[in-house]
Amino acid sequence: MSAVNPHKKETAASIRVRKVRAGANRIVAITAYDYTFARLIDELVDLVLVGDSLGMVIQGKPNTLSVKIEDMVYHTRAVSEAVTHAHVVADMPFMSYQSGFEDAVRNAGRLMADGGAEAVKLEGGISIAPIVERLVDVGIPVLGHVGLTPQSVNAYGGYKVQGKTEKAQQAILQDALALEDAGAYAVVLEAIPAPLGKQITERLSIPTIGIGAGADCDGQVLVSQDLLGLNPEFQPRFVKAYAQLGQMVRSAVSDYATEVRGGRFPDPEHSFS
């Protein structure tokens, strides 16, 4: 088992200096949505993202668009109660910041004050750079997100790799540069060609965290349920399942059900005399 130093608290500032070319270890990030799982992974990773992917993973929705700020506050609070080492970042859900400075500051403030987040993540580039700058100005660290931005799924016509043309690649690069200029301390790069991930990583002075963006990013992030094999029906190219817990869960519950139906559980060992 590979663990980081549990006595060192990761922050936006400590993540910001984690550039591969500076000799830093790559950033390990993973999603979490509840206290139990967050407690298990805290000392093993650098960054815990409470993603609006909970709309799909936890709520069973087809996309992230229906997730509300109340959902994000609730799940972020559960995760932050468990985490003492990793840096906790909360996604700002659809339409919680796009409408302007006032909504963005209020909702980001809720995620930090009520949810215990230490930073927020926003999707978009040049178009939201002024909002990122405003949040940073009032003391709210911002993690950017460019490439495939799931809140724009309807505009894309589905979850598709972005940056397939030279023009599209330049647009994504400019988006990332705009976020850096606005004060973001790191940027997530999602579902883009690996050479573009490398190019952006080399151009930015802040870290890049990839998900389907190649091996040259300064870090990687995956959805916890995906890397644990809890959702075998969902296996995009960029996901590697490090376990098959879905099968283990079904096997364990099947054994439990068999023993209960057969009167073998609880036995004397698991009963009070």
Image (cartoon, rainbow, N blue to C red):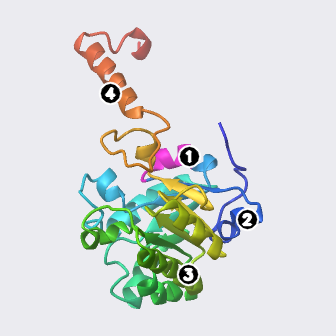
Q: Identity of the amino acid at label 2?
A: Arg
Nearer to us in this view, 76 or 89: 89
**Residue 17 shown left or right of residue 248 in the figure:** right
Nearest-to-viewer mark from 1 and 3: 3
The magenta span reads 33-41
**Residue linked to disc 4:** 250
Q: Identity of the amino acid at label 4?
A: Arg
Quick one: label 1 or label 3, which is nearer the N terminus? Answer: 1
- The number of numbered badges drawn on the structure is 4
Residue 21 is labelled as 2
Quick one: label 4 or label 2, which is nearer the N terminus? Answer: 2
Q: Residue at x 30, y 58 (%)?
A: 55
Q: Identity of the amino acid at label 1?
A: Ile
* Residue 140 x/y as whole percent: 54, 79
Q: Main secondary structure of the magenta part?
A: helix
Q: Residue at x 25, y 52 (%)?
A: 60
Contact between marks 4 and 2 (CB within 8 A): the answer is: no
Badge 3 density bin: few <14, some 14–19, many ≥20, Cα 10 Å: many
Residue 154 magenta-highlighted: no
* Residue 222 x/y as whole percent: 48, 52
